[in-house]
Image (cartoon, coloured by chain):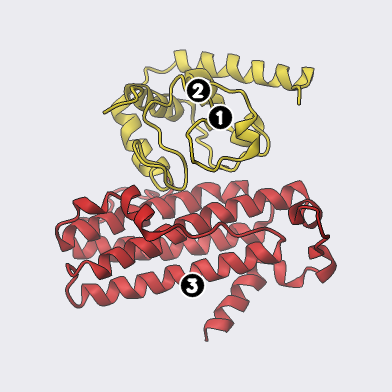
Chain colours: A yellow, B red
Amino acid sequence: MRRSASGRSVVALLLTVSAACATAHAADPEQGKALYESRCAGCHSLDQDRIGPRHRGLIGRKAGAIAGFEYSSALRASRIVWSAQTLDAWLADPERFIPGQRMNYSVPEAADRADVIAFLQANSTKDR
Amino acid sequence: MQSLKRRSFLAASGVATLSAATFGLVAGVPRRAFAMGSTQARDVDILNVALGLEHEAINAYQLGAQSGLLQKPVLDAAVLFQSHHKGHRDALMATIEKLGGRPVAEKPMAEYAKALNAGAIKSQDDILNLAARLELGASNAYLGVIPAFQDVNLAKVAARLAADETMHWTALSSVLGRQLPSAPLSFGA
């Protein structure tokens, strides 16, 4: 299904706002690691699919692309490629970014999101 | 006693009062499409994530109990905590079904063992550290999804689940000799 013009505008606005927020905070991957362990590790890990899919190599990966993991149909159909900008919009409000997703866990503070994303970027290579 | 707990859980979620017609099943059509609106479907998705966490916790404690590494009274506590998670699982499954959803299935134990790197476990402390990590993660996950629930009664259920996980984490941390958090509001942050 094609995304509506209003939907594209919302996504564009989210990406613009998220990019502005990202530049206002010096992202800290070490702080991001601590945040990842407290907020994300309930369901995710870097190297194993658990309640959520594994995260190592996430940057540059198409959403819903881990073979064998049961994603929501909304995520699989999203055509999103994970970048700092798309991750920021996703973590800020997953349901607004991809309606019908299943995560439903948000990270409200922009600085926290930037730190988590910096940690994921530091673990963006596919192999350990 | 267990049925009373389950009834209380369902009553708290509000689903026990929904009419049977709400959950009608029409042959050949996905049940969810008829049984739920989009807001209810979102709540079911959140509950299914919670159920996935409970499946994982049950299997983690089973791996610990079967390892031969846990000594009494730690083994007794692990079995008790596992029974709490089984209670959570049963209540979540019943609630999901009442809402017209399909509960996510438990995976084979070998998959949980691989995902949790069980092969690296060599001692009782390794098991307790893994359990504490999972309990803390679950507590934070439950607290984190509370704002996403459309039904405030389900949000309350998530808070009650988080309270149980926090109790487990606190007991495990005590056995491990860890200090309690020095700052307030450390959970869900």
Which numbered dot is residue A82?
2
Left or right: where B189 falls relative to B74: right
Amino acid beneath label 2? Trp
Same chain, labels 1 and 2? yes
Left or right: where B20 falls relative to B98: right
Which residue is depicted at the point 35% across and 30% down? A32
**Chain letter for the residue marked with disc 1 in the picture:** A
Alpha carbon separation for disc pair 1 and 2: 9 Å
Amino acid beneath label 1? Trp
Residue B150: % across, % down: 69, 51
Return the residue at label 3: B87
Return the residue at label 1: A90
In terms of secondary structure, where does tag 3 sit?
helix
Alpha carbon separation for disc pair 2 and 3: 37 Å
Left or right: where B169 falls relative to B175: right
Q: Do we see residue A55 in this rendering? A: yes
In terms of secondary structure, where does tag 2 sit?
loop
Residue A93: % across, % down: 59, 33
Within 10 Å of the Cα at label 3, are there few (<14), some (14-19), or many (20+) other Cα atoms?
some
Identify the image quadrant of the C terminus of chain A: top left
Within 10 Å of the Cα at label 2, are there few (<14), some (14-19), or many (20+) other Cα atoms?
some
In terms of secondary structure, where does tag 1 sit?
helix
Q: Which numbered disc, 1 or 2, marks the residue that appears first in the sequence?
A: 2
Which residue is depicted at the point 57% across and 65% down? B92
**Marks 1 and 2: CB-CB under 8 Å?**
yes
Residue A67: % across, % down: 48, 35
**Chain letter for the residue marked with disc 2 in the picture:** A
Given residues B11 and A4, the one toward you in this image is A4
